[in-house]
Image (cartoon, rainbow, N blue to C red):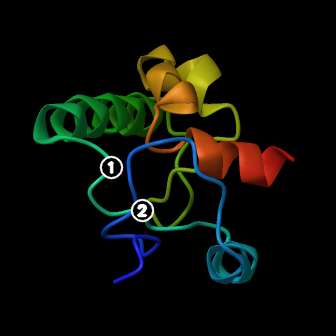
Amino acid sequence: MDGTSATTRPKTGVAMTPEERTEFDRNGYLLVPAVLDPDEVTTYVSAVDGLYDRHLEAGLLGANGSLHELSAVHTCPELAPLLDHPGVLGYIWSVLG
């Protein structure tokens, strides 16, 4: 492997590859495996579950039960550390330009 695939990419602020950018543009998201450690996954899943529960209680979910939150960090500040997490910073920089 050349060290650039999603599973072997170093956890640094590396920009998206052209293939990753195409995938992001096509799907609107990009899966980046092995960036978060298990404790981080637990923390962020709990934060999003809490956000979902608050929207459910307030009747703010979509008709199919979906959650759509454009300002996720504003309404769920626990997600803020993801914005400059070393494993995703390069991806965010690539999207924002």
Q: Is residue 15 left or right of residue 51?
A: right
The amino acid type found where label 1 is placed reads Val
Residue count near mark 2 (Cα–Cα under 10 Å), binned few <14, some 14–19, many ≥20 = some
The residue drawn where x is 82% and y is 45% is: 96
Disc 2 residue type (three-letter): Val
Residue 42 position (above or below residue 29): above
Image side of residue 16 versus residue 2, left or right? right
Query: Residue 63, image x and y in percent?
Result: 55, 63
x%, y% of residue 37?
Answer: 19, 40
Q: Which residue is mark 1?
A: 35
Give the SS element for disc 2: loop
Q: Mark 2 and mark 1 in contact? Answer it, CB < 8 Å.
A: yes
What residue do we see at 38% from left, 53% from top?
A: 10
SS class, disc 1:
loop
What residue is shown with label 2? 32
> Residue 65, position in %: x, y?
44, 59
Of residues 2 and 90, the one drawn nearer to the viewer in this rendering: 2
| Above/below status of 2 relative to 79 | below
Q: Residue furthest front?
A: 2
The disc placed on residue 10 is none
Q: What is the crowding at mark 1: few (fewer than 14 residues within 10 Å), some, or many (at least 20)? A: many
